[in-house]
Amino acid sequence: MRTFKSTKKFTRSGDVLLRVSYPINITPKLKLTASILPIYHLSNDKYIDEFNVDKEIKGSEGLTLNGNAYLDYELNNKSIIQLNLGMPFIVRELRPDGLTRSFIANLEYRIKF
């Protein structure tokens, strides 16, 4: 069972990120895009403990590296369906913000106007 970190008056540090992607046209209507998304959490997060003392959550700073694959299918010149699959390759030691996912899958429908 996982241990739960206190989040009373939780203060989340900022992030810096940079997505790098490479599109590959498979057919005129089908495109595959491979992508990596490094996210660096700038410093350790903080919270207030049961004695009202400001505490730093050691291990919450650091790098997360996500990989994504996007598959776009153009239905017509105004509509696109996209399948997005992603997963982390590298994760921070502690992620008290609740943003951890081991795998994501999204289906998106786009209309151009």
Image (tube, rainbow, N blue to C red):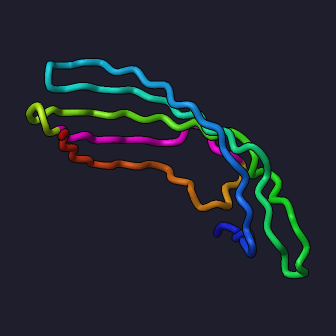
Q: Position of residue 109 (x, y in %)?
A: 21, 47
Q: Position of residue 40 (x, y in %)?
A: 67, 39
Relative depth, front residue between 23 and 66: 23
- Tell whether 22 sits left or right of 96: left
Query: Looking at the image, how many numbered discs can be counted on the residues?
Result: 0
Residue 21 against residue 54 in the figure, above or below: above
Q: Position of residue 81 (x, y in %)?
A: 20, 41
- Tell whether 49 sits left or right of 38: right
Query: In the image, is residue 90 part of the stretch drawn in magenta?
Result: yes
Magenta range is 80-92
Q: Residue at x 34, y 26 (%)?
A: 33
Q: Main secondary structure of the magenta part?
A: strand
Q: Residue at x 88, y 78 (%)?
A: 52
User: Which residue, as the protein is rendered here, is positioned at the far left?
Assistant: 76
Screen quadrant of the C terminus: top left
- Tell whether 2 sits left or right of 106: right
- Tell whether 29 sits left or right of 24: left
Screen quadrant of the N terminus: bottom right
Q: Residue at x 50, y 50 (%)?
A: 102
Q: Residue at x 48, y 34 (%)?
A: 67
Image quarter of residue 64: top right
